[in-house]
Amino acid sequence: MNRKTKPQPSSRNSQLVQLKRAIVELSSELPSVATSDCKRFKKEQLLNILNGNYVDISTTHELPEELVKSDALNSFSHLSAMDKELIQCDFEGPRSSHFVSVLDIHNAFDSWCGTCALEPSKQIKLDSGLFNPYGCWRRSHTSGNLGFLMTSELKFGSGGSMFLSNQRTFVSSSFAAQTHGRNVVGSLEWESDQLDPSTSMVHVVHVNTQQSSEHDELIEIEGLLGQQLLHTRRMKEVSRKSSKYNKLRNERIPSFLAEIIKSTHDGWVIDGPSKNSIGLLAICIVNNGCAFAETSAFQTTIQNLSRELRVKFTFYNLPEVSDYVARHLFLDKNHIPDGTFSLVMVLDPLIDLGGHSI
């Protein structure tokens, strides 16, 4: 059930790496969900760290069953003493009739959290009123302390080059306040219009296939210089060149976006907030009347990659996106104008309870 394929790191993920570092640091201090039990657990865990009693759970063994079941042990003092139901894990795993500790679901990842993410009830659906389908402390992030929304735009340069620009990262005011002055992540923003900020981890790339590039601007200048000589013929030539150039340029969009998807997935597997991160949970296209996004050449490339990565791919028309998801991810006509589309990459929000070292 493990979807990891020994990926290689990519320099494209510098912002994601910074976000990961911030999330790992904050996850050792702040509760991931807004329940009294999670707050108590985090308080006691933080006290242990301050007292010098922090133990790397990767080197920790399970406690004797008789000790776990006795009244002598504080159930919040060790992950081996905490029942998985305490962290609101609702997955029925291979030993659901026996006591399963929080340490168990970390160590036996493929049998628990890894398999849970593949359950039909846990699939990401943009047309649903619930974007994050998890309820546990490791993935739900109802506290709004640890999630983010990163947005970018696909831009065209000279010579047919492409790059991501206008990268912005939206978080909750709590996330921004906690990272202020720590020098662990770049510029962060928060918007009062965003519903439930920092409750998921998502990268959205907006694409306008009709945007001008440096090549288009050069053609326009040439056209202006030649206005006095055969103006009408010149304009037809400019239109022909621009149309041909845009066609050739757009043919490279599928492979470029596929590279972005793969590098994002691989980067999160290698260096996500949990050592067990499975990368992307979902790949979605949200289209607002862009004919190019509906072509088989485009969709086949993305579909083939999603099968390779074992990540579900779904195509949506903008009106199909639920109002909640639209306001959570800024997927509306202001951000996806007529004739454009957006690539939505949903990252695994899994964290290790106690820090990245688990």
Image: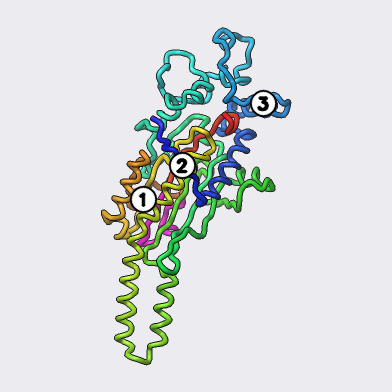
Q: State how far apart marks 2 and 3 are (Cα).
A: 29 Å
Instruction: Confirm whether the magenta stretch covers residue 241.
Output: no
The type of residue carrying mark 1 is Ile
CA neighbours of label 2 inside 10 A, class few (<14), some (14 to 19), many (20+): many
**The residue stretch that appears in magenta:** 330-344
The type of residue carrying mark 2 is Leu
Q: Position of residue 236 (x, y in %)?
A: 30, 81
What is the tally of numbered marks visible in this picture?
Answer: 3
Image disc number at residue 211:
none
The type of residue carrying mark 3 is Tyr
Q: State how far apart marks 1 and 2 are (Cα).
A: 15 Å
Q: Earlier in the sequence, mark 2 or mark 3?
A: 3
Query: Which residue position is annotated with label 2?
Result: 347
Query: Which residue position is annotated with label 1?
Result: 285
> Is mark 2 in CB contact (under 8 Å) with mark 3?
no
Q: Is residue 92 above or below residue 69?
A: below
Image disc number at residue 54:
3
Callout 2: SS: strand
Q: Is residue 156 above or below residue 122?
A: below
Quadrant for residue 162, please give it: bottom left
Foreground residue among 239 and 320: 239
CA neighbours of label 3 inside 10 A, class few (<14), some (14 to 19), many (20+): few
CA neighbours of label 1 inside 10 A, class few (<14), some (14 to 19), many (20+): many
Q: Nearer the viewer, mark 1 or mark 3?
A: 3
Q: State how far apart marks 1 and 3 are (Cα).
A: 43 Å
Q: Position of residue 233 (x, y in %)?
A: 29, 86
Q: Nearer the viewer, mark 2 or mark 3?
A: 3
Q: Position of residue 193 (x, y in %)?
A: 52, 51
